[in-house]
Image: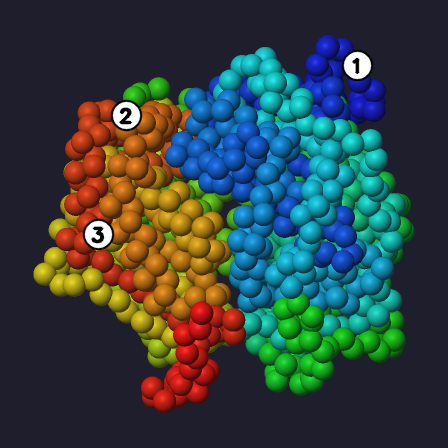
Amino acid sequence: MKYILSLVFLNLSLYAQVSHLDYTEIQDLSIPSAFSDREVEKVILKNGLQAYLVSDPFVQQSAAAVVVEAGSWEDPEKYPGMAHFVEHLLFMGTKTYPKESEYSQFIKDRQGLENALTSADKTVYMFSIETEAYKPALDRFSHFFIDPLFSTNCISRELHAVDQEHAKSIESDMQRQYMVFKETGNPKHPNHNFSCGNQETLSRIPLSDLQDWYQAQYSANRMHLVMISSLPIAEMRNLAVEKFSSISNAADQKKLPQGSLLSDQQKGSMVFIKPIKELKTLTLCWEIPSTFSSLDEKFPEFIAYILNKQVKGSLLAKLKKENIAKNLSVDCHRLSKDQSLFSIDVFLTDPGLMQTDTAISYVFAALQRLKLEPLDDLFKEFKTICTQRLIYESMDNVYEKVIELASDIIYEDLSTYPTKTKIPSSFDKEKFSEDFLAALNPSDCIYSLIADPNEMGVVLDQKEQWMQVEYTLVPIDLKRLQEWKDVLVNPEITLPEANPYLQDVQDNPILIGQDESAEVYFKRTYSSANGLAFQFRSPLLDQTPKSGVLAELWLYALNDLLADDLCFASDAGIGINTDLNPLYFYFEIIGSNEKVLLLTKKIFQAAKQVSISEEKFQTYVSSLSTQYKNSSKKLALFQAQMEMESIISHSPCNQQKLLALQDLSWKDFLDFSEEFSECLYTRAFLYVDLSQNQAIELFQELQTILNTKAYPLTQHIEAKVLVLSDLNNPSKLVLKTEQQGSGIVVLLQEGSSSFESRAVQKVLSQALQTAFFEALRTQQQTAYLVHSYAQERENQLLQYFNIQSNTHTANDLLARFELFLKDFDKNLDTEISLERFETIRSSIVSSLKNMAKENFSDRLRTLFTLSFYYQDFERIKKLIDNLNALSYEQFCMLSHQMLSKDNPRKLAVLVEGEVPTKDDNSYYELSCREDVQMLGGFVPHSD
């Protein structure tokens, strides 16, 4: 370990180069991983493209990403959104692979994911796929950057997709806040411009301008390639050279602007913004001076590490104590190599909205504490945590990991990456206090308040250009700014204590305990990773709205009771996931050290002590009420999804829970909390590095802590799912919303589950996902959000189809879905040929065989499900056997039965919002035949 940590202090600016004909190998000077089987190689291709390659034999899939150092800040002034538009167009075919959907279908048919994102200074393209298909996928992917088509046939349709994407963002309060920030910012900085683009800004771009912009910006020497795979590192290097060396290299490199993001009018002013949802959010934001953009110090991240802590003596603890805020978030947002923003978001309570001045003064008091106190020990802790996270970095989710790596690789020299990006190397207290904290002063801060203007008592006299966000900008009185600058430290806002959680094989699980109060399985990890999953069932969780609300309030209180422990544990790399179901409470604790067991015991102890004051109860009620109310302000599709779930699971919807919440008293909660912990049935899965006897002792200790009465299985309420009768016609439930757009969810019930029918469903669903997206999103441009997926639930097979559109009514979307399903069924042998059937089946089998390579959290949940839901550890093997035995003829026959109009078990939930009509598609309604004759004149035949 001393050797590993000492690498941080090497002179990392020097590195050796080994020259080869097609690439130059860069010596890797980053901190090595704790996983000895993982290999990293860094090369620069002859065209200047830099590649970062990770070979890990335990990853389940392979992934790749290309980041281009050209984003929205490079948009031509007359065509805002150009970079984003080009990102979309690259998916529309290449000269080598001209079919529009070929790339996406190839990826998705092989259990993969693909997407892209455009930010201020870069555009990132990424995909993941089963390793057997990695090479052909890389070939298709690389041609994005070699010979894109830019077909005129695609441009108008993809223009509509960009327009839909912009429309989808209009009701995102986070996006609306950022659009106001851009509009009020420095008009000479490209960040001021409209980066997403829409039909208005992009419809007149000449094809030649698109191609010229692409050629100028998409240069190999402005690109980085990231690859993750279980393939040997030499094979990965050969693939990188073979597939990406043909990308052209333009000599001219455009530098990003260095002017300030902010305008003078923003600094020291409060921006009041009207939200879509019921929000009360106060934000303090600073532009970080470029002198502090160095990766070595990480001053902004260090402050965020301290202020984000939800422990005794923290800023948030003080805000909560005075009922000013419910939560707090401190973040650093890097927009380019030299420009970053530092922000503090305070999520206010209802009374807190009238105490924004106090909240701001507490923020500056917390910063003042950092200026005056010694911080060496805290910085050492921060650095240790950053180092451990990098050394034990997981590659389980290769898709998410490749996005993360590609997004920040451009900011660091390849030789040291990712060490400097992840780990601070030095701390100069004087520079931190006298220079950096001095820059976080009240006069240079932008303040914004997102809340109902009627509650704020302000008149919003401006509208942002592209989203029509209502806002006003008001300079803050100089006297008040000076008071915040002169604020003293607050004795109740202190530095956090030292983190106590920091670190200074059988084939199948074994049932190690079972009685009328518990059932526990155990499997040893034989590694540093530990995971424990628990499910609490109680007679009080009975699927009623009241029990659901009380359970959510109980979880709020439990989280508050454990706030210090959860915060410290999170910093130490211990993760906690929870799931509150109408019939049970599920939680899991995962980490790479033995302190996971300590935290588990603390959670069990806290579960017996959940109690809150009446004032705290009212705060929780207010927060939960807002959450329920805001559910009706989500996208129409999300509302439809919530309604569908409530219907088929016979669980209360948010409106029912809101009514139940209004009738609850503090005594109701106290009674629930006391009774809940007295009678429980616990299901536990211990996936830990302990012997069997040690695991038994651990669970016995946990049972002693709970000390509950028995709740026999015979008394449990069984989970159920609505099975539609085949005697009824397909049905639809139509709901209205005040939000823009329409959303529909269609449920197709495919019958009872058997291993054979489940095998058919998995292959069919994989093909449906691609075809459904291709038909309604790519070809028809009906909607931006188009998705289908399959589910097995309570021994029933369910297939869902989801659509969100800002241009089509819900009934129109439903009609298009029906037409799609009819055509897909009719042309099944074309949509899924024998060759494609075998490709998809092989991909699914490979994925199932590789479940041992799932990320640790997913593996824990799979083991829990096999233990308690299926009670069959051979289930995956049986499914693989049935997939291999499934013939193409049998697949087609059963698929037709599932898709046919003879299967009437379809339910649609339609949520209809405001859908603008387009004049060019409208017809004037006539009332009689005579009106028709007035439209023109009759003419005789003429020779």
Residue matched to label 2: 508
Q: Badge 2: how crowded within 10 Å, few (<14), some, or many (20+)?
A: some
Q: Indicate the position of residue 122 as horizontal and vertical percent values.
A: 70, 43
Q: Badge 3: how crowded within 10 Å, few (<14), some, or many (20+)?
A: many
Whole-number angstrom distance, CA of label 1 to CA of label 3? 61 Å
Which quadrant is the C terminus positioned in? bottom left
Residue matched to label 3: 749
- Of residues 470 and 746, the one nearer the viewer is 746
Tell me, yes or no, if residue 45 can be seen here.
yes
* Residue type highlighted by circle 3: Gln
Whole-number angstrom distance, CA of label 1 to CA of label 2? 48 Å
In percent of the image, x 17 and y 33: which residue is there?
890
Task: Give the numbered dot on residue 899.
Answer: none
- Residue furthest left as drawn: 727
In percent of the image, x 67 and y 85: which residue is there?
457
Q: Secondary structure at mark 2?
A: loop
Q: Secondary structure at mark 1?
A: loop
Circle nearer the N terminus (1, 3): 1
